[in-house]
Image (spheres, coloured by chain):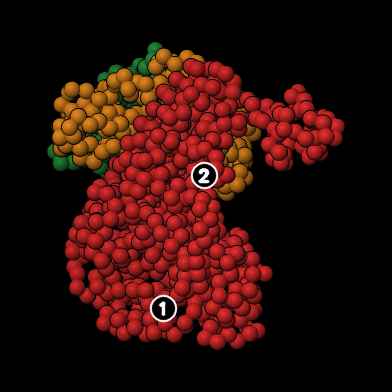
Chain colours: A orange, B red, C green
Amino acid sequence: MVNLIINDKAVKAEKGEMLLAVIRRMGIDIPALCQHEAVEPTGNCRLCMVEITKKDWDGWKRCVTSCLYPVEEGLIVETHNPKLHDIRRTLFDLQLANCPNSEVIQKIAAEYGVYKTSFEVQPDGDNCIMCYACTRICEILGKSAISATQRGHNKVIAPPFGEEPPDCIGCLACAHICPTFHITWHDEGGVRVIWNKKFELLTCRQCGKKTITRDFAEYLVEKRNIPRDYFDTCDDCKRQETARKFGSVVIAAGEASL
Amino acid sequence: MFLDSIDKLSAWQKDCRKKSEAHKVKVQICLGPGCLAAGADLILKEFEKVFKKHKIKDVPLESIKKTGCHGFCSRGPLVVIEPKGIFYGKVKAADVAEIVEKTLINGEIVERLLYTDPDNNKTYTDWKEIPFYARQTRISLRNVGQIDPDNIEDYIARGGYAALAKVLKSMTSSQVIDEVTKSGLRGRGGAGFSTGKKWATAAKAEDTPHYVICNGDEGDPGAFMDRCIMEGDPHSVLEGMIICAFAVGSQQGFIYVREEYPLAVVNLQKAIEIAREHGLLGENIMGSGLSFDIKISRGGGAFVCGESSALMRSVAGEIGEPRAKYIRSVLKGLYDKPTVLNNVETFATIPVIMDKGAAWFSAIGTKRSTGTKAFSLAGKVRNTGLIEVPMGTSLREIIYDIGGGILDNRKFKAVQTGGPSGGCLPENKLDLPVDFDTLTENGSMMGSGGMIVMDDRTCMVDVARYFLNFLVEESCGKCVPCREGLFQLHKLCEKVCAGKAFEEDLKLMEDLSRVIVTASLCGLGQSGPNPFLSTIMYFREEYLAHIKDKKCPGGVCRDLISYVINDDCNGCMACLRVCPVNAISGSKKQKHVIDQVLCDRCGSCYAVCNFEAIDIV
Amino acid sequence: MKYRFQVIPTLCTGCRTCELACAFAHAKDGKLGKSRIYPLAHAENKFVPVVCLQCDDAACVRSCLFDALKRNEETGAIDIDYGKCVKCQACVAACPFGCALVDNEHDEIVKCDLCQGNPACAAFCPEAALRYVPVEEGTAPWAGRRQTIGKLPPVLPPKK
């Protein structure tokens, strides 16, 4: 256990825990756009910055991203002060210039009193805030079908060479984790299109409902050892099947319980 | 000779010295980047041709030496004839026959190729007496320009690997670290962290293996010290790394060389192979039981890969992006293992410290910044090139005594130190001693040692804009303040240059810069606004002139200047002919006039006018 | 004291009170939740309340790419960690009983969580077809679940 002080309150935390987790647990509201529990923190958005110091630092303070800073014994943390407020405001101001149409950004920027950017709005600005959540989650799958390419302001999240990503399995993890709904896809006529790649959707053998992509099912069969026939029917039909099979057991046995 | 014991080195050294003394005269041809660009390879070919044709007494073909950068780049291509040190500059292939005939055969001097000081018309024969060289103290550059980088015997003859032998024979690893700590050596890559402390932390780290990395990703525009060391004296880098490996207990080293230095890769690779052949790298070095090998890792052309965490990711084959360093890379670096990362110049300095001792080294320079520092002097200064001076030397000495003052006798305006994220210092800071702390206190930084001199025809807003543009393009784009913040700062700077900014914009720029400095993830962003911050600190009136008066005092910003023909015009029609938009009118021998509406301020007329008849207002 | 969720299909009349109870128990933001339990007819007037069996070595846990599904040792339920779930629906496709569901109303993946140890359906079942009964000390509430239903889809092959 590690003892530290956050906003004048003494708290205990597990060794190796990151500051942000402790701050959130205390119920303190602190913005973070790139952080997601399913992936490793990277510190891209810088919004979760806090000011830290220690008794023996002679008053020296330092701003760090709390999502990446492991708790330390005797750490004194401030999560809100004029300096941090100023940093967050400026970051939102910059984000608003870059993603002028993102409702997510507009909403959370407004909470910090930023309604209009002071900077030059990017006319071709999309909703991507370059948080890397998508690339990180794809990396966990062991696919890394997409990655951040180019650099600086031209950086984009894209499949290799901007072509159809050969490693993509159409699982939509990237699209679902995206905090600003930048990554889009559509399912139509049994075909899913994401990253310009077309995927065949599995069809329920009984009712014809579309489930996940064939590539995703194959991945689960191969990597997660799920029997292939589990993917033959949809969840509705599987429940029906469960009732039917279980019913026959009950009839045969006279009485049974689950 | 294969060294299977430490004692064999001294015998080999004697051999090498004898061999080197066998040639009475040595013709050293500088093949540094500057001289090569000026045609040094043609001169080399010409020398070889002449030597093959005529047998010269006492001067066999072997006495031609292909050396690395000799330093005085603005005089290149250079040919130095040792042991007298006869220094010929701006040599052309056509001069070679004359040099051979006069100097090598008859022992005379070719006067017209010697260096003449334009201030007092004094001509120098021996390069060591030229003020450019005489005021330098060369430690890390000790062999650069003096030896053939491909020939290990040259290096051995000048005392190479003796420091390593001394370390392996008579010192423990903690003694080595103590010695480095006592020497006060601070990392030459820019941040100036104590090298001894870094090594001590790595040596103590429990996790294994330990790695040693040499940072040869010298990306600052106008900086070429590390390049010249890697190209001209690769063995000194290897020796420094082996000593470090001994001190911190490492078996594997890497040299990260930037993509743009192919010759450095070739020379280092050759040096590594030669060192292996002689038992100086690999298993059981010189029979001492120390095993250490070095691999070269090539960069992919990203400036940010000079940053330690990005560099280590790049070496490991990942995307070269920095990561937050709340756990120091010396404990968790390459492959998350303890890693010592030092700059090329730092490693090249280590053997000298081991050889001559910490006391000798710390006596040079200032108390908190010991030793010497290599700089590449560039810009509007007469003598450009590679220099090395003791820490604490004033900027004035560097620019006026070594650099020979400003080109065309113009007025000095500013000197930019520390590369793109460094800062510009004005004239009243010229007497500042150059060391890590003083430069940082004054809003600039040491950086890796680029030094760009600017004259009064430079617009400081434009300079800030230029360097910000460089940083915007080189930002990796990972974190918001650097990617978006520098981008917007650059946009605002462009707005000032175009005369479209308001005074409030300066406030916005200052506020934004402050956030970028505190909130950025790595050093690139944290020092990114420096070009703006240091120019606004010292040259605020220039910004205001752009904003309020819509004028560019330096006469650079296109939107704010106009070219006007004055009464010195004699109607030669040169400008009229060169104008691409036909904005100049006037007949022969009559004063010409520029139509300001048509003129698009390309500056062609200004460049061709021989009578200074065109003013920039 | 640990409890085990018990379903006795022969007592089920298909009244769907459990569905209502479940939907109310999982209501949030002013909207009913999707019911996690379904009394389905397998023959005329014969019903089986189909609900998550909280399997040992469950397919949903195995299929989850980001470790968002974990056994809650207290209640015996397999719970979804919503901080980690990215709604990829791997569990929905993988569950052989169709008991991992998509709640379109709340835009999330849901499954039976035994109401954090106080299942509303069992409390409201008028025929006591759904029960939450104590288990012997030292026995895991979910032990042997799969054996009971041996004729249902085969037990998962062992992990590679």
Left or right, B598 with reference to B179: right
- Quarter of the image that includes the C terminus of chain B: top right
- Residue B557's x, y, as percent? 61, 30
Q: Quadrant of the N terminus of chain B?
A: bottom left
For this orientation, the residue located farthest to the top is C30
Residue holding disc 1: B153
Residue B477's label in the rendered image is: none
Helix, strand or loop at mark 1: helix
Q: Position of residue C158 (x, y in %)?
A: 35, 53
The vertical placement of A84 against A251, above or below, is: above
What residue is rendered at 39% in x and 12% in y? C30
Q: Are marks 1 and 2 in contact (CB under 8 Å)?
A: no
Q: Secondary structure at mark 2?
A: loop
Q: Give whichever of B153, B268 is nearer the camera.
A: B153
**Kind of residue sitting beneath label 1:** Glu
> Which residue is depicted at the point 47% across and 14% down?
A115
How far from the left and from the top, in percent, is residue C27?
Answer: 37, 17
Residue located 57% across and 35% down the image: B457
Check the residue under mark 2 and report the chain it is in.
Answer: B
Q: Amino acid at mark 2?
A: Ile
Disc 1 to disc 2, how far (Cα)?
41 Å
Rendered residue at 39%/57% (across/down): B136
- Placement of A192 over or under A48, stated as above or below: below
Residue B309 in sight: no
**Residue B5 to residue A162: above or below:** below
Q: Which residue is mark 2?
A: B406
Q: Along the polypeptide, which appears first: circle 1 or circle 2?
A: 1
Task: Judge the density around disc 1: few (<14), some (14-19), many (≥20) Cα neighbours within 10 Å.
Answer: many
Q: Quadrant of residue C52?
A: top left
Is B12 in front, or is C45? B12
Nearer to us of marks 1 and 2 is 2
B36 on left or right of C60: right
